[in-house]
Amino acid sequence: MAPTPEPRRPYKRPAISDQQRRRELALQAQSARRADAQARARALATSLLTTRAPTAATSRDEEEEEYEHEEEEEERELTASGVAAAAAASRLRGSEARRWFARQVMLPEWMVDAPPHLATDWHVFARPSGKRCLVVSSNGMTISRVRNGSILHRFPSALPNGSKRDISGPASSYSILDCIFHEPDETYYIIDMICWRGYSLYDCTAEFRFFWVNSKIAETSAGDPPSTYHRYRFSALPVYECTLEGLQAAYSGSMPYVKDGLVFYNKHAHYQAGITPLALVWKDETCSQYVIDTNNKGEIPSEQHLVLELLEDGKSNLRPGNLLRFAVRDESVKLMDGKMHIGQLQFVGKPNRARAFADSHSKVLFQYAARHVPLRIEDLVASIQSNNMEVESTDVEMQD
C-alpha cells in the first residue's frame, strides 16, 4: 500500500520587514517594565478632565457639545509623578498639547507581514469607521477627547460617576475608555479599557482587558439607548480569537457599524501608549473604503505620498517639528534588511494642521506594499493554516 502523501503546506508570503523581531523585543520590554500604572491613570484622567483644549486646530465637527451642569472643585490624591505629569500637560498649548494627547493612545503598527501563531496568540476585530478618542467619566460628568486633545463631547453618561444622577462611591473615582465614535448611529464603540472605577489596567494583558470591557459594561446601563442622563450609547466590540472562523467573522461578518479595516491584538500585550508592534491594523478594499492614502483633494495620487517631520531647519519659512508632505518615486525605493530606503523625495506641501505626527515607518511600508506586493486576506488565512499544521504535527510527535 502506497504511503499517504503529507498535505502540502499553504504558500506563505515572504516577510519584507523586521516587524516580528520588534514584536519580540516589545514583549520583553513590557515584562521588564513595572511603572506606577495607578499614577499614570490618575495623571491621564486629570489631564482629560481639566486641560484646556488646543482649539487652534479644532475643526467645526470636533467642537465641544455642552450640557447644563454645575462645576465642582475636587481634590485628587495623586502621587508626585502623577501631579507632575498632569501639571505639565495642563500647561501645554497648540501643537505641543496635540502631540501630548496623541501619545496617550495605544496605536497599532500597520501589518506588513503576517505574524506567526496568529491563531493562538492574537485577537482580531473589525475596526469601526469614526473618530478615535479617549473617554473619561468622573465627578458626575463624561468628557471625550480626540487624538489632538480637542474635546469631542461633554455629556452625561451611564458610565460610573458619568452623570450627576448616578454617583456611586467616591465622586472623584474615574474610568477611562479607548473608543471610536461612530457618527451614523451616535455610538461610542469601545476598543480598549485603560481604567475602571479607579483601577488601572495599563499592566493587564489584552485578553484580560477585553474580558473586563464586556463584563463591566454589562454591569451598567451604558449600552442602553440614549436618554436625558445618558446622551450616547456605549458598545463593546465583537472580538474574536484569530482562528480561521474568527478571522472570517471579523472580515466578512455583518457589523452594526461601517468597517475600516481589521485590528489584531497580541493577547499578552499591555496597554502601551504610542505605537506598538503588539497591535496591528490591516486593510483591503473589502473591509475598508480607505486602503491607499489620498491627497488633500481626496484623490489617490499616481505616486505614493508620505508625511515626515522636519528635524533640522533647512529653509527660512520652516521650523524643526513642522510636518511636510512628500511624493515618492517607485524607482527610488529599496527594501533592505526589513527597512525601506528612499533615495529621492519630492516636496508636495504641508498636511492638515490638525495632524500631530508624521507617518510611522510601518505605515509607509504598508502603503508601498499595498501598491506593489499587498498582504492579502489569503496570506493571513495561509499563515493560520500553516500554524494549525505545525500544532497538529507537534501533537502527532507527542503521541508517538
Image (cartoon, rainbow, N blue to C red):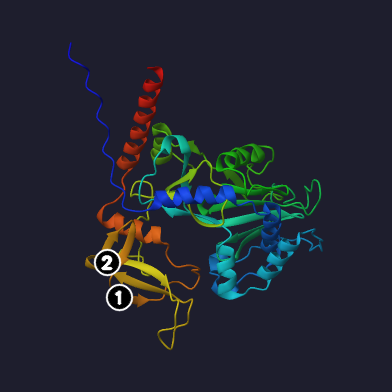
Query: Farthest residue in the bottom direction?
Result: 316
User: Is residue 190 in sight in this rendering?
Assistant: no
Quadrant of the rendered image containing residue 92: bottom right
Q: Is residue 92 above or below residue 143?
A: below
Q: Mark 2 points at which residue?
A: 303
Residue 211's tag is none
Between discs 2 and 1, the one toward the N terminus: 2
Q: Quadrant of the N terminus?
A: top left
What's the residue at 80%, 58% (across, down)?
77
Task: Say what amino acid the circle numbered 1 marks.
Answer: Gln
Question: Along the line of sight, which residue is nearer the eye, 353 or 69?
Answer: 353
> Residue 394 location in percent, x, y?
38, 26
Q: What residue type is labelled 2?
A: Glu
Image coords of residue 161 (percent x, y): 75, 50
Q: Provide the secondary structure element on which disc 1 rests.
A: strand
Q: Residue at x 32, y 62 (%)?
A: 340
Identify whether 215 is placed above or below 42. above
Report crowding for label 2: few under 14, some 14 to 19, many 20 or more residues within 10 A (C-alpha).
Answer: few
